[in-house]
């Protein structure tokens, strides 16, 4: 990809989510996909959330990855405003109910407003999914995603071979 225009917006409810959300940033770097990363809170900065979601598409973003924990309304609220695909990352932010609060808040969206929800803390998978969406239209990215998956397969086959010896 030859431009520095961010194609993926990585947002999170708090800077305490950053440790997990770095996983999305790292894999997007590996795929050579430009991204931006910032904190947008559905509850503490609701107007900033509305502004971000409203302008995301016109600013050139193609996919939004939104991570949040607890009453994790950020991905769903952003999805309710933007026409871009939104990938939700449930974050285990407290031990009280093992992250089920985050998972269910992001997963259980009403009809019409889908959020592509990855597993608990699975920011890397969110990055791979974002690359896959972009790769469906961008051949360079698509080829990298294919190579990534081929490599996963090769790694497994190597282990299978080792088991035979
Ligand atoms: C959520 O509350 C955030 O996404 C974070 O996972 C959780 C805790 O936030 P802090 O109190 O650490 O800022 O909104």
Image (cartoon, helix red, strand yellow):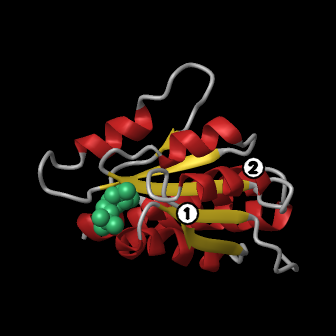
Rendering coords of residue 26 (x, y %): 53, 78
Residue at 45 percent across and 43 percent down: it is 73
> Does residue 13 appear left or right of residue 80 in this picture?
left
Q: Residues within 10 Å of mark 1 (few under 14, many from 20)?
A: many
As measured in the structure, the alpha-carbon distance from the residue carrying label 2 to the one carrying label 1 is 14 Å
**Taking the image as four quarters, which one is ligand 1 found in?**
bottom left
User: For the point 39% across and 63% down, which residue is it?
Assistant: 156
* Residue 50 appears in view: yes
Q: Nearer the viewer, residue 115 or 75?
A: 75
Q: Is residue 68 left or right of residue 134?
A: left
Counting residues from the start of the chain, the first of labels 2 and 1 encountered is 1
Q: Which residue is mark 2?
A: 54
Above or below, 147 relative to 109: below
Q: Residue 86: x and y, percent?
A: 61, 46
Looking at the rendered image, the disc whose residue lies closer to the viewer, 2 or 1, is 2
Q: Is mark 2 within 8 Å of ligand 1?
A: no
Task: Give the quarter of the figure containing the N terminus.
Answer: bottom right
Can you tell which quarter of the image residue 164 is in?
bottom left
């Amino acid at each position: 990809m030859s431009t520095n225009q961010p194609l993926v917006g990585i947002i999170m409810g708090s800077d305490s989510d950053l440790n997990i959300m770095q996983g999305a940033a790292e894999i997007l770097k590996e795929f050579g996909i430009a991204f931006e990363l910032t904190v947008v809170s559905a509850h503490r900065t609701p107007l900033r959330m509305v502004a971000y979601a409203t302008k995301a598409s016109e600013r050139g973003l193609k996919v939004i990855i939104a991570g949040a924990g607890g009453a994790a309304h950020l991905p769903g609220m952003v999805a309710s405003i933007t026409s871009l695909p939104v990938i939700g990352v449930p974050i285990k932010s407290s031990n009280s109910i093992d992250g089920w609060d985050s998972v269910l808040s992001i997963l259980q969206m009403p009809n019409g407003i889908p959020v592509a929800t990855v597993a608990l803390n699975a920011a890397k998978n969110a990055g791979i999914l974002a690359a896959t969406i972009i790769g469906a239209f961008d051949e360079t990215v698509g080829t990298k995603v294919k190579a990534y998956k081929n490599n996963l397969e090769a790694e497994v086959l190597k282990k299978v071979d080792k088991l035979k010896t």
